Amino acid sequence: SLPMDLVGGTDDATQELESAPGGMDAHPVRSCGCASRRRLSHWAGLCAPELLFGLALAVLAIIAAAAVPHSHLLFGALSGMCTPFGVIFGIGTPLLLLHVLRLTGLVVWCAVKSLWRKVRGGMDRRDQDGITTSTQDGCTAPHTGDYTPPKYTCRDTASAAGPSRGSSSSDTAVASPLQSCGHPVWRRATGWGRRAGASNRHSSRSKLIACDLCVGLCLYLVLGVTASVAWSRCAPPPPLPGAPADVESEPPTAQAEPPTNHIELDPQLSSVQEAPTLNNTMLARQIRFPPSFKFGAATAAYQVEGGLHNASWYAFERGLSPYEHTQDRETTRGYAGRATDMWELFDDDLERMKALHLQTYRMSISWSRLHLARGQFDMPALARYRRWLRELRLAGIEPVVTLLHYEEPLWVSMQGSWANASTADDWLELVSFLAVQLGGQVDVWVTQNEPFVYAGLGWLEGRWPPGLVMAVRDWWLVMVHLSSAHRRAYAALHALDTADADGDGKPAMVGLAKNLNVATPARMWSVVDPLVAGAGVWGLINKLYLELIDGHRSLDFLGINHYFELTVRGTDHSFGVPETSLYQITCEAAAWYPGLPVAVTEHGYWTTDFPGVDDEARQRYILASLRHLMRATQQGLTIMAYQYWALLDSFEWESGFRPRFGLYAVNFTADGRTRIQRDFAPIYGSIAARHAQEVALAARQAPARRGCHQAGSGGRPVCHEGTGTTVAGKAPSGGGGEL
């Protein structure tokens, strides 16, 4: 703490030094002649308290975080998320807020002190003898009538404290140093109060205000520029040539006009049932991806299979044990029940996949159906899953199997779900069992689907099982146990799945389906909006879990689940579905893990109308998104696949059957769960079919280019690779990933 005279103006102590014998030359500091150094140190001292205060807060935060269970994982995640953008926000924002707080406190302090002095400190009164006296902060001094400064005497006296301000050495009534009126010791002791206007001189206060304004403005500009650079790193690509102008400019809406101007399809697309519209057909023909890319669709077991009475969601929907605490609220809009009844209708749905020329299908294995108890599995259910996988491969469709998609057996829920460390061991038992039993049919595994969403909605918001609200400690334990389970599953799948189902030399590729959202500040130059969007969405929601699992070491590919963009305004946010957001989030993910392939494991567009056959809004949105995603591959991003969510309308958790994403509408009130093809299905099928033809053409041309020959009439190609080995039946790939 520095005396106020060092930052402008003078106080009485300085006046005393000037009037003392020898004047200012007798002062040991002022006599050194280091005026410029003194001014620099004094001005630096204005901002030093904020720096020290920020450092103290950081130390306290570290100590508090160290008390959290498994705090080493938290520190590792935070260090992994450190970027120049994050550092500037982490340091700059608290400093800016502190300066704003101090500036506000300065103004308030001065206003209150001025008012107080007008009421009490500045009043003149006459004593009983008729002598005019002046009072200030409890001290009095008689007016002598001349122009000499008054000598104040304070009520709280101590003979050992020395003379009070303005009194001579012969005065008997002296004040305590800490209570003396305006004494420098008082200003040093009060610290912040001294800075907030303890001096009466306007020059001192004006310099403090100028310092705060300058520092605050600089920090504000730095934060704004940094935010602008960060949000524009993966800016939307420019429009592709040849696209109708209205498609780029019109946002997708749920109330679009029905498609018109139908045309005939190419002969090779005869298996698609109905022709799409002219404009959308033109867009579909422009979509081209590398040969290694695959088009597909996705579903999840509990949402489509039906009959899962041993699942956690079955009990949660009805408020049964162990979820009795949810009986007084509506947990879901209806029950899943039979859902789409895919457990009985899979063969029919497989024919629909073939008609759409899909090259990949993402499905999940129901943990609750298969894992009856520790060490006990439902072998007939396993046999049915194995048959599904075999038929998918015979149809030329690559199965992508998810091992944890939001549901678990009730016996796991009864033991505390993922807040209990033993749940990870139980799930690893399932993972190891499936790796051995199904490894011959599966080469691409997704360990978990959106674990951050699962933990947040279940243990913080209470909308999903187990229905707990702000159980922060349990939420953190769930995050730790899930991330640890993923790392162990990654190692187990690579160790146990040694069968190469498609003969490409990679028996297992293990990834994670992570929800990733684009977040944009509504006000770029606001401090709060970029901070919430950056630290809250990009940091906490998008990246925290990826850092917990150490994605650089435990991922062969990163699955992206993406549906919308968030526009952040303070603590509020709004949802949007811009056609460029899929490109932006893919670009960001590729920047996080250079060289790691990414796959779009979920992306879709939902409406509420049934059957909603004329889904023009869905067509325009998905086609525009695919065209931007195609631009990403042209820029060098390694994208393995696009899997549309979903093949069928399905049970959408707490929202029930209201949101409808499917390529095929499902009548959930009909006993047969009738499927109705939407207009977007043939358009998507035409894109997939054309891509499959291009891949087949590239495979037929590849043997001649790579020194391969046909093994007999109509046989499969035999290729002599650079290592001298002969691989039979392996079609050359275009690079980029297994999917």
Image (cartoon, helix red, strand yellow):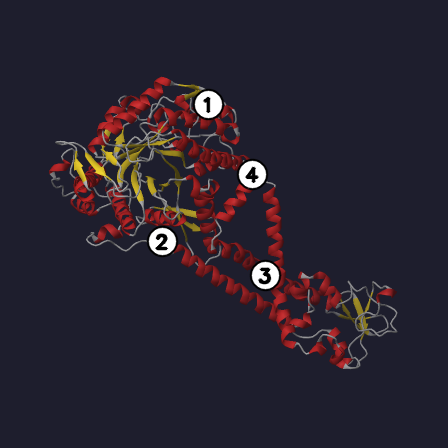
Callouts 4 and 3 close, C-beta under 8 Å: no
Q: Earlier in the sequence, mark 1 or mark 4?
A: 4
Callouts 2 and 1 close, C-beta under 8 Å: no
Mark 2 vs mark 4, foreground winner is 4
Q: Label for residue 410? A: 1
Residue at 61% in and 50% down: 59
Q: CA distance from mark 1 to mark 3?
A: 56 Å
Callouts 2 and 4 close, C-beta under 8 Å: no
Decide: few, some or many residues near mark 4? Use Cα within 10 Å; few <14, some 14-19, many ≥20: some
Q: Secondary structure at mark 1?
A: helix
Residue 479: x %, y % from top left:
49, 37
Q: Can you identify the residue that label 3 sits on? A: 104
Residue 30: x %, y % from top left:
71, 77
Q: Secondary structure at mark 3?
A: helix
Residue type for callout 1: Leu
Q: Can you identify the residue that label 4 sits on? A: 70
Q: Can you identify the residue that label 2 sits on? A: 234
Q: Earlier in the sequence, mark 2 or mark 1?
A: 2
Q: CA distance from mark 1 to mark 4?
A: 27 Å
Q: Which image quadrant is residue 29 in?
A: bottom right
